[in-house]
Image (tube, helix red, strand yellow):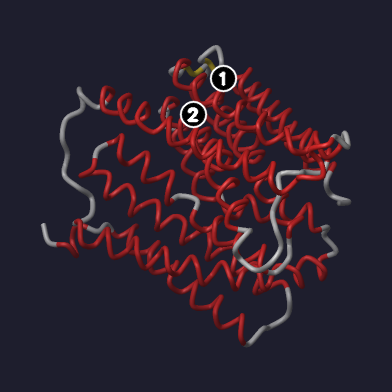
Amino acid sequence: MTGALAVSRSDRIICGAALVAAALTGVLRYAPIGTVLPFVVGAVALALLASVVGRAVEALGDRLGAGATGVLQSALGNLPELFVGIFALRAGLVGVIQAALVGSILANVLLVLGLAFLAGGLRHGTQRFDSARAREISVLLLLAVAALAVPSLASSLHTAAAAHENTLSEIVAVVLLLVFAASVPSSLRKSAAESDGEEPHAARWPLPVAMVVLGVASIGAAFVSDWFVHALEPAVKSLGISDTFAGLIIVAIAGNAVENVVGIQLAFAGRTDYAVSVVLNSPLQIALVLIPALVLLSQFLGGATLTLALPPLLLAALVVAALVAAYVVVDGESTWLEGATLIGLYVVVATAFWWG
C-alpha cells in the first residue's frame, strides 16, 4: 500500500481541518474581528492539532509497541497545553494557567471519567476493568497531588517555608519529575507483558508520514498557542467571565478535547480497561510532568514566575477530585450512576469558580 493510501480519509480530513483552523487563527490574530471569534477559533484549532498529534503518535506506536507508545504519548500528548502555559506565563497570566492546569486534572478525573462511566454504563450495564492498573495510576496521582499541596499549605499557614515559595516549588517540581522518570521502566515492562499475546498488525501510517505530520503539528501547536493566549484576555473580559473560570473550565476542556472524546468513545464501545487508562493517565502526566516543567521553565521565560502556592479553593477542589477518583476506581467496576455522580460533582466545582 502506498503512503497516500495508507492514510485514511478520516485522518486526511482531521489534518486538513487542523491546517485550516490554524491558518484562520493566525489571520484573526493579525486582523482581529471582534474579541470572541479569535478565541473560539483558537480553541478549535488547538483541539484539532492535539488530535493530529495523537493520531501521529498512535501511528508511530504501530511500530514502537504499546509500552514505548505510552511514554511517547505522555511526552507529546500535552504539547498544546505546554505551549499555552509558556505563552500565558510570558503574558503574566499566572492565575489563568494555575486554574487551567488544575482544571485539566479536574476535567479528566470528574467530567470525562464520569461521562465515560455514564456512556458505557447505559449501554453495557456494570463494566469491569483492571483494578490493579487503575489503582496504581490513582495512587501515583494522589501522591502527586499531595506533593503539589505542600507549597500551598505552607503559604496558607504562614510557615517559615512561605518565605521561600519559589525554592520550595522548584524542589517539589524536581521530585515529581524524578518520580515520573522512575515510573517509566515499570510502565514499559507492564505494557510489553500485556502485548505478548497480541497479533502483529500493519501500521496505519507510513513511518515518514507519521514523523512529518507529528513535527508539523507540534510546530503548529506552538504558534496557535501564542495566538490563542493573545485572544484569551480580551475574550474573557468581553464575555464577563472570570480569569479563574476561563482557565479552570474553558481552557482546560479545549486543551484536553482529544482525550475527552477518545475516553468516552472507548467506554461506549465496551473497552473499559483502555478507557480508564487513557482518562486517568492524562491528569497523571499533567501532575507529574507538565506542572513541574512549567514551574522550572518559568524561571527562565522572562515573564511571570509560576509557583505551586495555589488558592485554597483551587487546592481543595484538586484534592477532593483525586480522592474521589481513587475511591471510584479501586473496586475495578463502574456504573452509570457513578458516572452521573462524578459529573454532578464537576458541575458543583465549576459553579463555585464562576465568580472567580
Q: Are marks 1 and 2 in contact (CB under 8 Å)?
A: yes
Could you say which is closer to the camera, residue 265 or residue 200? Answer: 200
Residue projecting furthest to the top: 331
Task: Identify which residue is drawn at 60% across, 32% down.
Answer: 144
Crowding at dot 2, Cα within 10 Å, few <14 / some 14-19 / many 20+, comes out as many
In this rendering, the answer to whether 30 lies above or below 136 is below
Rounded to the nearest angstrom, the CA distance separating label 1 from label 2 is 9 Å
Quadrant of residue 146 within the rendered picture: top right
The answer to whether 237 appears left or right of 216 in the picture is: right
Callout 1: SS: helix
Could you say which is closer to the camera, residue 125 or residue 264? Answer: 264
Circle 2 residue: 276
Whether residue 216 is visible, yes or no, is yes
Task: Identify which residue is drawn at 51% across, 26% down.
Answer: 137
Q: Amino acid at mark 1?
A: Val
Query: Could you tell me residue 300's position as x and y percent?
Result: 60, 63
Circle 1 residue: 329
Crowding at dot 1, Cα within 10 Å, few <14 / some 14-19 / many 20+, comes out as many
